[in-house]
Image (tube, rainbow, N blue to C red):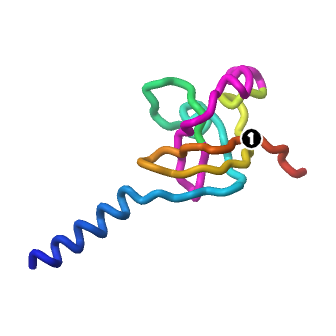
């Protein structure tokens, strides 16, 4: 019985703390609070939607993307971004992040 319990605990811990690598994937990007309606103690912060789940982005300087509250800023317009990085502990750690033009 103890072995079964330990096996289940191991499977659970692996799935909870699993990491997922993302390479050059085009995703929706915008303010987690304003565009994705997520709660955040830090206020406006960049977030991405990967596989139908929203993740706050770490490893980027949001100021690099201009005024977040401008008419075309990431708090007012959902954008597409090509990203690479890793999902860990419920956040997306970006190694690269760039907005891309949407195809019309």
**Which residue is rendered at x = 26% and y = 67% of the image?**
10
Q: Which of 1 and 50 is in front in this view?
A: 1
Q: Which residue is drawn at 84% across and 44% down?
A: 101
Q: Choose between 16 and 103: the one closer to the eye.
A: 16
Find residue 5 and report its horizontal and vertical position in percent. Answer: 16, 72
Give the vertical position of 78 relative to 12 (above or below).
Answer: above
| Left or right: where 1 falls relative to 92 | left
Q: Is residue 39 magenta?
A: no
Query: Is 75 drawn above or below residue 87 in the view shown?
Result: above
Which quadrant holds residue 78?
top right
Question: Whole-percent x and y of residue 64?
Answer: 71, 26
Q: Quadrant of residue 66?
A: top right
* 58 sits left or right of 96 in the view: left
The residue at which mark 1 appears reads as 98
* The furthest residue to the front: 95
Quadrant showing the N terminus: bottom left
What residue span does the magenta drawing correspond to? 48-71
């Amino acid at each position: 019985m103890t072995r079964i319990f330990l096996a289940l605990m191991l499977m659970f811990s692996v799935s909870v703390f699993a990491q997922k690598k993302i390479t050059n994937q085009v995703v929706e990007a915008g303010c987690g609070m304003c565009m994705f309606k997520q709660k955040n103690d830090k206020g406006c912060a960049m977030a991405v939607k990967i596989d139908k789940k929203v993740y706050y982005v770490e490893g980027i300087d949001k100021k690099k993307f201009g005024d977040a509250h401008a008419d075309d800023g990431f708090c007012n317009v959902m954008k597409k971004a090509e990203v690479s990085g890793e999902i860990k502990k419920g956040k997306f750690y970006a190694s690269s992040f760039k907005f891309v033009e949407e195809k019309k």
